[in-house]
Amino acid sequence: MNFPVVHFQPWGETLQEQLAAAARAEAAGAAVVWAPELHRSAPVTAAALACRTGTVGIGTGIALAFARSPFLTALSALDLDELSGGRLRLGLGTGVQRLNEDWHGVTWDRPVRRLRETVAAVRLLVAKAHAGDPIDLDGETVRLRVRGYRRPYRPVRDRIPIHLAGVGPAMTALAGEIGDGWISHELCSPAYLAGHILPRLQPPPGFEVVVSACCAIDDDPARARAAAAGVVGFYASVRTYADLFAFHDLAGEQQRVVEAFRGGLPADGLAGAVAPAMVDRLCLAGTADQVAGRIAGYAGLAGAVKLSPPTYGLPPERIRELQDAILRLIEELHR
């Protein structure tokens, strides 16, 4: 079978456990390890990953683009690229309106335009901050007027790859237009990628399509499916993803999850309301051989598949088992 490149998003109950998992993934043959941003800071985690590994790529997947200024994002990217010896992929995403406004106190204003101008600002600062020349960007949502500043360190690279996360059509198209890569949502089947994403993305040559995949491996396929169901249930409770479920003929199944959520079940406790077909169509769940076959299904569509264990509604010991199974599979795929 032909396989896309395998990336990995390590989990850990502690940061040290997360770093140890990343080191194991590097030894097993993973091409990139990614640092998410929700319960930890993506740049801080990425810095720790860079120090713990030697050759594997390091990605922020994803860092919030609007919660930091473009200037601080650029400085973080320059530091991470130096720390990793030029291994950084800067993954950026907008997040949703409620997260920006209620969690970070950031105005939600024309997010597509703002992300376009944020990327332009970051690239400008990465390329020019060491030169000491004036830096100007007169955007509609992002403005720079930098005078009397010179970063006294030469960058490892004048251009750091920027991968953009996108779910909706406008953000997806923007990623293909200005990004060096695109990072998918955690539920992204080959059919959805081929029929819904790639026509809008229209990736140019050299562009990296990275599919994020919830991956649950168990000798008992039913147990694997049950482990992944919490992730599906969490996203099914959010109306934002209605188009995703409808595309897979799962609108009715999603509605039943929504009703369970409205009935009082917590967002991370909806696994029991998830129909098996939802997991089968949206996750990589099954035996190691079955999951390997599902990964091969992305060949020719995605340049890389980023594997991560399910976490919603699961105790740490079960997540640990699932992560170990992924790491064993990565090693097997690279023999």
Image: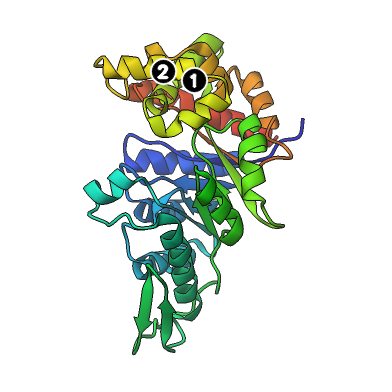
* Left or right for 109, reference 278: left
Residue 52: give x, y in percent of width and height: 44, 51
- 3D distance between C-alphas at marks 1 and 2: 6 Å
Between residue 146 and residue 253, name the one nearer to us.
Answer: 253
For disc 1, the marked residue is: 251
Residue drawn at the location 57% of the way across and 18% of the way down: 280
Residue 73: give x, y in percent of width and height: 38, 64
Describe the element under mark 1 as helix, strand or loop: helix
Residue 297: give x, y in percent of width and height: 69, 30
Location of residue 88 with respect to 7 vertically, above or below: below
Are the residues flagged by discs 1 and 2 in contact, CB closer than 8 Å? Answer: yes
Residue 316's quadrant in the figure?
Answer: top left
* Left or right for 163, reference 304: left
Residue drawn at the location 31% of the way across and 57% of the way down: 67
Residue drawn at the location 34% of the way across and 90% of the way down: 148
* Left or right for 8, reference 270: right
Between residue 161 and residue 24, name the one nearer to us.
Answer: 161
Q: Look at label 2 and name its amino acid.
A: Gln
Between residue 103 and residue 131, name the one nearer to us.
Answer: 103
One can see residue 54 in this view: no
Image quadrant holding the C terminus, namely top right
Q: Look at label 1 and name its amino acid.
A: Ala
Residue drawn at the location 55% of the way across and 55% of the way down: 174
* Left or right for 43, reference 3: left
Image quadrant holding the N terminus, namely top right
Give the number of the disc on residue 255.
Answer: 2
